[in-house]
Image: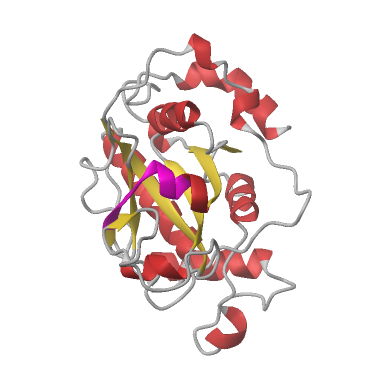
Amino acid sequence: MKLGVVPRSAGRRVCALENYLDLSKFPTTPVVLDWQTAAPQAVQLFANDRIGDCAVAGYLHFKETVAANAGHPMTFADPADAITLYTQATGALNGQRGGAYDPADPEDTDNGLVLVDFLDWQMQRGDILAHAEVNFKNEQLLRLSRWLFGGIYWAFNLPEAAQTMKFTWDKPSVFNLGDPAPGSWGGHCVNDETHDDDGNCTVTSWGRRIQVTPCFRQIYGLEAHVIITKEWFAAQGGTAPCGFSLADLQSDLQQIQNA
């Protein structure tokens, strides 16, 4: 299994979602939320078992999930579409870190991506409308963000101990071999599409679904983002599956993009 999140530079400006949402003005988020069931196909490896394209894999899983829930399913070719997008993104963004991914020279060119750079690039290309960072220490905001935008695009500072956690990421115990320190394994990106009444969420990574506990998120969370896409608003004349209207968001998107 490969990792591939590169930490962003200190001082990098990122739009914070909590600056634009008044939590008191939103209805109560569903206690149990599942965007995942509608997109059973969104569990492909996307080559992340052999290259560090987790930023791309998580992004494609997200796109598949929101499109399926909006009633217009899409499926990306595995692994061809992921490798193509990773090659394009690294070529555009990794000028100082090896340039475009080259399968003939993975040692020098498989260098991962900075998530916010990748999302900015996707916005410039017109593939997404906007993105914003979520304060993952705020569980209420996490639940609201997942409901409003169809998922959360995460980076975790994984411990080496997570290598023995196949289907559940929780606080390491004596049964988990390896270093429990944040980042002792490395940075990894996943897509998060569910939550339950205990606060657990489920993420997609390496061809499987993994339950993530609130404790693990608080210890090992590195960054979390919402991604606003046209696909999410493709149902019911511009209304998302959660009932959010794209028309209601249009006036706010420019403010978010310019923050």
Q: Position of residue 216 (x, y in %)?
A: 43, 50
Q: Position of residue 160 (x, y in %)?
A: 45, 70
Magenta residue check for 212: yes
Residue located 62% across and 85% down the image? 108
Magenta residue check for 189: no
Q: Residue furthest front?
A: 174
Q: Residue furthest bottom?
A: 104
Q: Position of residue 23 (x, y in %)?
A: 52, 17
Q: Residue furthest top?
A: 25
Residue located 50% across and 10% down the image? 25
25 vs 125, left or right, is left
Can residue 179 be seen here? The reply is: yes
26 vs 15, left or right, is left
Q: How is the image coloured?
A: secondary structure
Quarter occupied by residue 112: bottom right
- Residue range in magenta is 209-217
95 vs 140, left or right, is right
